[in-house]
Structure formats: C-alpha cells, structure tokens
Image: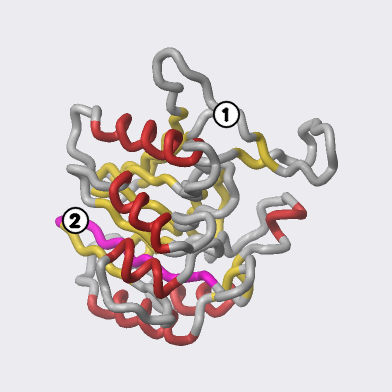
Amino acid sequence: MIVIAHLSDIHIDLDDGQRSIGRARAVMEYLEGLPYDLDAVLVTGDIADHGLPAEYEQARELLASRHPVLVCPGNHDERAAFRESLLGRPRSSAPVNQVHRAAGFTVALCDSSVPGKDEGFLEEETLAWLEDVLDATPSGVPVLVGFHHPPALLHSPFLDGIRQFGAERLADLVDRHPAAVVAFLAGHAHTPAATAFAGRPLLVAPGVVSTLRLPWEQRAHPEDHVHLDAPPALAFHVLDDAGRLTTHYRTVTAPAGSAWW
C-alpha cells in the first residue's frame, strides 16, 4: 500500500504576521507526528506568496521532513527563485518539471505556471517531458501526474477563469498511455474537490493558507472569495496493491492555546 500526503497553497508570506508560516508549520508537524512513514508528501504549488527568495528559504525550512517532499510551482511562484532558493539548483526561467520514481509508483510533477499570469498552461516542453516520463515508466507501474492548476471546471466562476487551459493536449497525451496514468493531482482551488479529467480521477488538495468560498455559500461581499479562518487541510491518497486509489481528507487543529487567523 502506498500513502501520499497531498497539500497545496501554503503561500508563505513574511509580511503577514506569521499567519502563513504558522499554518504551514502546523500541517508539517502533524505529518511529522504520524506513526507511519509516508511514501511522499506532495505540495502542488503556490509555495511563496510573492515569489521572493526569502519566502522560499523559509518554505525550505518549513517543508523539511523525514518523509520525501515533492514540490511544483504555482501561479504565485517565480521559477528562477523557486529553483535556486527552494530546490538549490541553478536559476532558470524554464518550466520546473520533476519526476520522482519510488518502489511501486511514479510521480510526474508538471509546471503549469505561466509567468506573469494567474491561469495555467502546459508548455510544449512540459508535454514532451511528460511523454518521455511515461515512455520510460515500466509497464504496470502507476503514474500520478501532478500540477498546480486543475484542467477541468470546478464550478466556481472565479476559479474556473484561471484554471489550466489547453488541457485537450494533455488528455490526448495520456490517452496514448492508457495503462500508465492513474490520477491527476492539483492545487490552486483552495478547496478539497474531486472530479474526472481524461477518464481519470482529478483530485484537488485543500488550501493550507485559506479555503475557497463556493458560489452557493453566503458571504458578506461578492468578491470575498476565501475563508481566512477555516482550519488548514490536506489529502491522503492511498494506492493499494490492486491499483485502486482512495482519497481521505483531513483538517489540522490549531495548536493548543491558539486559534486560526
């Protein structure tokens, strides 16, 4: 059995009075306190709120774990600083695509960010990279494809306007590898969500820094899209020996004597 923790949108901001840091730290302390060694912790984007090197340095400290931690960029991230300050690699503006191969599974993390924009798009370089990953994956090894922007409608007008566009290209690619990809994992939405894309599950992690208000939920102002006081949450994806994927969602309680902002 493979167990992967999936969180997203920690939005580390050094000017928010420790709010984002405290919420991310609480989630990571929860994961560190588990009695079970996770197969991976996946963080699907918006690591830094402003894409600043100092934010990535703080995030690097917060995300240090006994579990393998995998990260990809979101629309708030800046590729060159992400590479240098978070991953310890040379600066570059090219897409940050990464593959993690472990016993019994593979995670392919695609960079869906578009520099200077909030919506997502997979560059041709990224699609070619993903096809190479799938071609090189042995038959029978399940692949989880992760990125920041969901490539399907989630029925929030605000969110759907900044989703991943050009997604039919991704659907065509994975259809050429029908036995390889078992699910897509995304962030960006700041809400736990499950739907389908290209005939496979599309599983969206909750937001750590905030939670999306859905259109049918009451709110004081029409443009008030997020709850700031809802607790941070995460998903656990379980891949069993029969190849079945099950997802559980968990909220994280506030540290003793404190409350969420």
Q: Is residue 230 above or below residue 72?
A: above
Residue with the mark numbered 2: 104
Q: In this view of the protein, can residue 241 be seen by the observer? A: no
Q: Is residue 151 above or below residue 62?
A: below
| In-front residue for pair 49/221 | 49
Q: Give the crowd class for mark 2: few <14, some 14-19, many >=20 residues within 10 Å.
A: some
Residue 227 lies, in percent from the top left, at 66, 35
Image quarter hosting the C terminus: top right
Does residue 175 show up magenta in the picture? Answer: no
Nearest to viewer (mark 1 / mark 2): 1
Q: Quick one: SS at disc 1? A: loop
| In-front residue for pair 18/47 | 18
Region rendered in magenta: 103-113
Mark 1 or mark 2: whose residue is earlier in sequence: 2
Q: In this view of the protein, can residue 212 be seen by the observer? A: yes
Q: CA distance from mark 1 to mark 2?
A: 40 Å
Quadrant of the rendered structure where residue 188 is? Answer: bottom right
Q: Is residue 100 left or right of residue 97?
A: left
Q: Is residue 96 left or right of residue 201?
A: left
Q: Which residue lies at the image location 47% right of the left edge and 37% below the top edge?
A: 18
Residue with the mark numbered 1: 261
Residue 85 lies, in percent from the top left, at 33, 64
Q: Give the crowd class for mark 1: few <14, some 14-19, many >=20 residues within 10 Å.
A: some
